[in-house]
Image (cartoon, grey):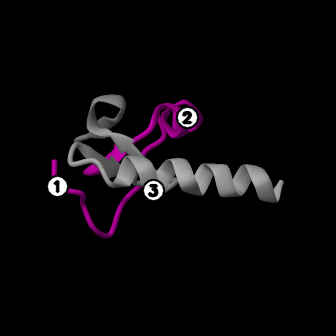
Amino acid sequence: MLVSLHELFEHDRQIASQSDSTRCGICYLHYFVSELHYRDEEGFYVCPGCERTLGKQTIPMLRQQQK
């Protein structure tokens, strides 16, 4: 488990160092913008995994991410 968390963190840091990346507003992991979907109603990016989990459910955010 510790090894997989280390690998996940390492992968996140690699993507975060790229200029065309941003965080998912739910899980806070970095993804390329092309992999994310911006939810206009709530004002944040969401990764495919979190989007699948959320479905049509809306989540109010205190702070919106810039598009």
Looking at numbered disc 3 in the image, what kind of residue is underneath it? Answer: Arg
Q: Judging from the image, what secondary structure is the residue with disc 3 in?
A: helix
- Point 28% across, 30% down: residue: 34
Looking at numbered disc 1 in the image, what kind of residue is underneath it? Answer: Gln
Q: Judging from the image, what secondary structure is the residue with disc 2 in?
A: helix
Instruction: List the residue tagged with mark 3.
Output: 13
Q: CA distance from mark 3 to mark 2?
A: 19 Å
Depth check: give the residue in front, 56 or 48.
Answer: 48
Answer with left or right where residue 6 lies relative to residue 24.
right
Answer with left or right where residue 40 lies relative to residue 62.
left
Q: Judging from the image, what secondary structure is the residue with disc 1 in?
A: loop
Q: Are marks 1 and 3 in contact (CB under 8 Å)?
A: no
- Point 36% across, 30% down: residue: 35
Instruction: List the residue tagged with mark 1.
Output: 66
Tell us which disc is closer to us: 1 or 3. Answer: 3
Q: Does residue 41 appear in this view? A: no
Q: CA distance from mark 1 to mark 2?
A: 21 Å
31 magenta-colored: no
Seen as rendered, the residue at the extreme bottom is: 62
Instruction: List the residue tagged with mark 2.
Output: 49
Q: CA distance from mark 1 to mark 3?
A: 21 Å
- Point 49% across, 51% down: residue: 12
Magenta region: which residues?
41-67
Nearest to N terminus: mark 1 or mark 3? 3
Residue 16 placement: quadrant: bottom left
Rendered location of residue 62, percent (x, y): 32, 69
